[in-house]
Image: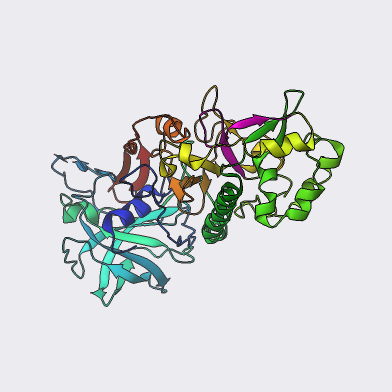
Amino acid sequence: MFRNLIAFVCLVSLALLTGCSSEPDSATPPVSEAEESAETREMNAPADVSAIAAPEPQAETATANSAVVIEGKTLTLNMNEQSVMGLQGMGMIDSQNEEGVLSIANWADPPVGAEPELDKEYFLLAASRSGTGFVSKGVFEKLPDNSVSAFKLDQKLDDLTGISHVIIFRPNDVSDEFIKNFQGNFSINASGKSETTAEELSAEELSRRAATQSETRNRMKMLGLAFHNYHDIHQCFPPGVIYGPDGKPWHSWRTLLLPYLEKQNLYEMYDFTQPWDSEDNIALLNQIGDVYQNLVYENADTSYTHFAAVVGKKAALIDAEFDGTTSGFEASLNRGFGLRDMLDGTSNTLLMGTVSPEAKIYWSEPRDLFINSRVAALDEEGGFSTINYGNGESLMALFCDGSIQTFTKDRLDKTLLEKLVTASGGELIQPSEPQAPPRKLLKIKADGENSSAEVVSE
């Protein structure tokens, strides 16, 4: 990760307000998930700023370009632009001694060779993936060598714990006098985040979620295999919902898949001549186990599902009707949509995705993402839910070819989602261009004991 400059700067810089999301690469709409384990080391930054008197800084010549603006005592750095950030390198804080010297491991130089100097002052920006961090300055006591360096802070951080990502930089237009007059350590917290950013999580929770990401993929692959095994027997996918003789939804695809999920006994106990919420069938809710559970939700009620399918006349799972008899039910099992009928291509047809426990969908309840009237956007009521697995909010989805794809919100807007949920819509599918992130500005005021540092969003 540290060899990828842009990804790391995004991680450290933008995590301060937005959190970092691992965005999948995509040449085609189904985007393969990047398998990453999140390094989630929490750091507590000091709340107070230690002040040291300093001489009045000399007037600085106003300089402006796409990334840096210096006006008198204030430097404004556009963190979306790295071209003139003056990066010296990046790594992980390993320890701090009594003199405030940080031992930095996993040091990586930027692609364009920087040559940091001893006794020359540099800014330091550190952050955990949960969004907390600090801005400080100091000098190299040991230049980077064999991926290790030592950096002495002007003022020791008494409350620094754990290990945090760190970058050391010095914008091209900053003078020695300017940085000399920047005094103190400044805590930066992830406040004012928009609703589309990842929620703040503890380091322990982030680590746990990252560990369950591969488990979620395996669970979805298991369900995908069950769909295809059903198709091998019936020459079609199961109906998404089977309507009873009263015109109401009686049975869900989740119940129909039970024999293909090693739940034959439960399948035989279920009475298909009665609705899903009949007294006899409701009694079976707590016997499903974690088959339809997303393990990222610890200690969740197994009566509910965390996976919903796309159901509708144009979807991969269509609806069927039956007369309430056993023979009528058995006939309805063959009335699904076949792979041969998916003219959009199985790799372009979204079959199933994650939903939040807050949706409270019982596993046998015929309630999913219905698309006959409209398609709900991500995280909208009645739609799929994104999840933070430790690397940002994303949707994990199963496609009809059995592949698992991961999308961030800006890559799966409502327009693309509407195309992917149809099996034979005939739409021309193009990957959505990621929306430009809002500008994040790091403002550093170099004014002796009145110095400050903050991150603001535009």
Q: Position of residue 87 (x, y in %)?
A: 23, 58
In the rendered image, which quarter is residue 265 located in? bottom right
- For the C terminus, the quadrant is top left
Which region of the structure is painted magenta?
A: 307-322
Q: Nearer the viewer, residue 417 or 94?
A: 417
Residue for point 41% across, 71% down:
94
Q: Position of residue 123 (x, y in %)?
A: 28, 57
Residue farthest bottom in this picture: 146
Residue for point 23% across, 54% down:
179
Residue 49 in sight from this viewpoint: no
Residue 427 position (above or below residue 34): above
| Colour logic | rainbow
Instruction: Check residue 321 for magenta coloring.
Output: yes
Residue 375 position (above or below residue 28): above
Q: Position of residue 24 (x, y in %)?
A: 37, 49
Residue 189 position (above or below residue 212): above
- For the N terminus, the quadrant is bottom left
Q: Nearer the viewer, residue 331 or 187?
A: 331
- The total of numbered circles placed on residues is 0
Instruction: Check residue 266 for magenta coloring.
Output: no
Tell whether 232 sits left or right of 61.
right
In the rendered image, which quarter is residue 103 located in? bottom left
Residue for point 77% across, 51% down:
266
Tell whether 81 sits left or right of 451.
left
